[in-house]
Amino acid sequence: MKRKDKGFTLIEIIVVLVIIAILAAIVVPVVSGYVEDAKDTKIINKAHNVLTVTKSESVWLYARGELLAKVNDTAWHKEVMEKAEVDGEMISIKLNESQTSTGDFVVKIDGKYVSFNDAKQEFTLSNDLSNITIHEQVRNELLSSSFIGKINDYFNIASRPERLDSEGPNTGSVLLEMLKEKGYDLNNFSFRIYKKYGGSSNTITISNQKITLDMVGDS
């Protein structure tokens, strides 16, 4: 008597498909995250090439007294990108605090905007130029005399934490109200300020993510 081969039942096939779907749901985002991280790293490396060229160029330009004129020259911006061998666009570039070299800049590379903070030696990526612009504007406001006075008043009280959050119950809310009066959309950013020591400046971090009270904590 011949034995008939038994095939998969419909339920078994469905179970296998469900398992495959679950595995795909887990693996695909992880792999996509790795791919995105690799792309971001590549963009940062390109931005670093731009940084190297701007610093190198500024040495010669400053020595010839041409740096101030060149920093806003779009033709020079294109030249910098070409020398860095980066296919992108220089959006803006500033002089450093001492006016002797290039400082902060924003470039567009592979569809993303990269800002470089010269004081902190940090690169920041964003899909939206307006986020970078808003962050820069808010940082400048927080460094202005009217805001610095409020910030220092807060930190001068010894019992207070050495960190000030925009969502904090004390001076944080005061600073937010001041920014609101200046027309800023408070839903677009949050900030955190760490107390300065010695001759250093307060450290200011600005984020697209809204800082909640749970994130702030009691410290």
Image (tube, grey):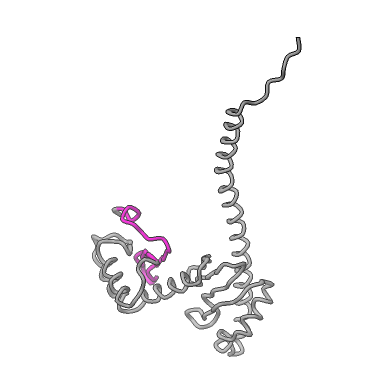
Residue 105 on image: x %, y %? 54, 75
Location of residue 59 in the rendering, given as x and y in whole percent from the top left corner: 61, 81
Total marks shown come to 0
- On the picture, is 8 further left or further right than 160? right
* 132 left or right, relative to 147: right
Which residues are drawn in magenta? 189-217
Instruction: Assign the N terminus to one quadrant of the image.
Output: top right
Asked where in the image residue 3 lies, by quadrant, the reply is: top right
Q: Residue at x 40, y 76 (%)?
A: 140
- Residue at horizontal 64%, vertical 78%? 80
Q: Position of residue 219 (x, y in %)?
A: 30, 54
The image quarter in which residue 187 lies: bottom left
Q: Residue furthest top?
A: 1
* The one of 11 and 172 positioned closer to us in this rendering: 11
Judge whether residue 150 is colored magenta: no
Q: Nearer the viewer, residue 183 or 116?
A: 183
Q: Is residue 202 magenta?
A: yes
Residue situated in front as seen by the camera: 87 or 120 = 87
Residue at image x 62%, y 64%? 45
Task: Give the residue at the far right of this rendering.
Answer: 2
Relative to residue 131, is residue 96 depicted above or below? Answer: below
Task: Name above or below for residue 17 compared with residue 191.
Answer: above
Q: Residue at 25% of width from left, 64% of height from top? A: 170
Left or right position of 4 against 27: right
Q: Where is residue 34 drawn, in percent x and y?
A: 59, 51
